[in-house]
Image: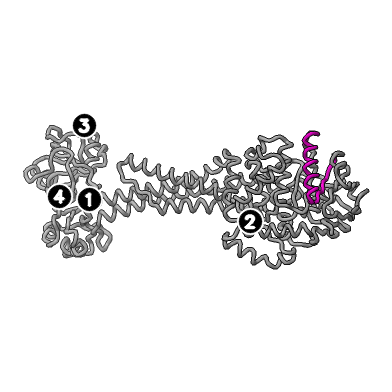
Amino acid sequence: MNVLELIDVSKTHAGSPRAGSYPRASAVTALHSVTLAIAHGEFVAITGPSGSGKSTLLAIAGTLERPSGGTVRLLGQPAHSLPDRDLCAIRAAMIGFVFQQFHLVPGLTAVDNVATALLYRGVPAASRRRAAAEVLADVGLAHRAGHRPAELSGGECQRVAIARAMVGQPAAILADEPTGSLDTAAGHDVIALLAGVNGRGTTVIVVTHDPDVAAAAGRVIRLRDGRIAAGGDAT
Amino acid sequence: MKLIARRRETTANSTGTTEGGSTADTANDASNASSAAATGGLQPSRMRPADVWPLAALGLATRPLRALLSAVGVAIGIATLVAVLGISRSSQAQLVAEIDTLGTNLLTVSAGSDFSGQNAALPASAPGMIARIGQVISAAAVGDVSAQVYRNDRIPAANTEAITVYWADTDLPRAVQAQLADGRFLTRATARYPALVLGAAAATALGVDRADGSVQVWLGEHWFSVVGILRPVALAPELDRTALIGRPVAHLLFHAGAAPAEIYVRANPASLAAVQPLLPYAADPAAPQDVSIADPADALIARADAASAFQGLFLALGGIALLVGGIGIANVMVIGVLERQPEIGVRRALGARPQHIAVQFVAEAVLLAAAGGAVGAVAGGFATFVYAASRHWDAVVPWPVLLAAVGIAVVVGALAGVYPALRAAWLAPAEALRLR
């Protein structure tokens, strides 16, 4: 069974109606009938030049965005047609996200940032923090649990963000350029961490420019101009 | 599939740990049962009510200075409302207490207008007739004297200082409970000679500060000795700007008539209501309809109520401050939503539903306004105490006003938070996370 199946998925962004953009941006097609399947336990890198639709693909795979056309099956669910309420439930329970800019909440300590991942599952605060402390120890940051993002290095921030993605024990972790803001050494730590998570059975899908990430992945999907250039079929 | 099975176990566990949670959660679960079936037994995402306020406090604590400044407007508005209500309550309480000590059993009888609209006159017999009513303790009259009083004979005739000259019965102080600042009131002896008693304001206007008989003033082409100066008369403030001379001397020197202009009647407090309707018939049996009766205590309270018309103006100002404060909060919240797009996006990515985001931002606005309101209520109460203390009043700050003030602040905060919260809730997750 596949974690993710995209069948003939396309995405067109409407022209920006925002004031100040003149001439008005015309509609942009980010994805043209993309079809791909990712099986359980895969470590997949999605690469391609800027503007090739990588981030859009990740947003659609993570139910943050709806496709303009086509079918998205996520863990067997028809994600393209479910109501928003169910998509939220899927994100809360089954998907972890990692972003290039970490996107940690500045006012929260590392352990509370990780615990936030369980906030929308109705887990009581004490249980949230206990689970978060365990996962933070797994990523080697037990000693930084009480520090705020501003007091952490970029690499540490990204490890906190990965811990946040892991704490809910999701079926899949989706990462958008996770090493994009890091130096090489910190980047390697992050790659090793993602590989470790993948080794324990979690599907990992990474959008990246980084050849080191692509090298660590089991499969590389190349996008060009919103179309799959290579690697679309499950191995 | 194994992963999903594990996922279900975890969900079941987490449900176990929330046992005894709020009933709202349970209701939520029930209403989502159908969609849970559609998503293969997925728990819909939910947030515990207990998590709302810590989340809101976090948002404010991240930008404390901004929170402080945006709460100031609401604090000022609430402080104004509380202080205005507190001060006016205190002043009314003070007035009522004063009137109570003076007694509310004073009535004044004066001539009204007759049928043709002319000013009627009371008969000279009126004071004596009124004094004969059983429950009347004392009745004293004052009457017009066609003369003006000046400090000396060099003052131009036009400089009257608006002082009225009356003849007065010798028991006037007893009827109106007037007290003398200096000297003594007219007696049966001094009422026959050129002696006079000045009201408090009249004495100040003429520059007379002692009443040992050594000071003389120029009254209607005669020198009169000042034998007494009254303290301000609370129940008959019209006496404060008068010069009072004896009835015999007024008749002798100025041919003043015996018809009283005003009769002050002190009645038995328990029988006041019974005495009042009798007064017109006693004062002027021939034309009782031309007699007008007034209750100065009522008049004073009515005047205090009229003064509280200004209170309405101040309350309106406080309301405007509150409105501006609410707009300020809304403004700051809108900016906060723009700045915190990534946070909103992450929360959506972590499974937050739009209403969770909305609740978070409304709670922030409510918390902000409630904090401002609480500070404002304390400040307004403090202002009331300071003002009352400066006037030697007992401060009255009604608890319902304080509670209502904080309640109003909460409502203002909730209204101010609605628009920013909706903007935050409607933000597309992919856009908030810059994934487009």
For marks 1 and 4, give the one nearer the viewer.
1
Q: Which residue is mark 4?
A: B174
Q: Which segment did they paint magenta?
A: A182-209
Residue type beneath disc 3: Arg
Q: Disc 3 on helix, strand or loop?
A: loop
Residue B330: mark:
none
Residue A143 image offset from top left, x and y in percent: 65, 37
- Subunit of label 3: B
- Can marks 1 and 3 be said to lie on one chain? yes
Question: Marks 2 and 3: in contact by CB < 8 Å?
Answer: no
- Subunit of label 1: B
Q: Quadrant of the N terminus of chain B?
A: bottom right
Residue type beneath disc 1: Thr
In the rendered structure, which disc, 1 or 4, sits on the residue that comes first in sequence? Answer: 1
Q: Which residue is mark 2?
A: A122
Instruction: Tell whether A87 sits left or right of A106.
Output: right
Question: Marks 2 and 4: in contact by CB < 8 Å?
Answer: no
Q: What residue occupies the far bottom of the structure in this picture? A: B34
Q: CA distance from mark 3 to mark 2?
A: 94 Å
Q: Which residue is mark 1?
A: B101
Q: Disc 2 on helix, strand or loop?
A: loop
What is the crowding at mark 1: few (fewer than 14 residues within 10 Å), some, or many (at least 20)?
A: few
In the rendered structure, which disc, 3 or 4, sits on the residue that comes first in sequence? Answer: 3
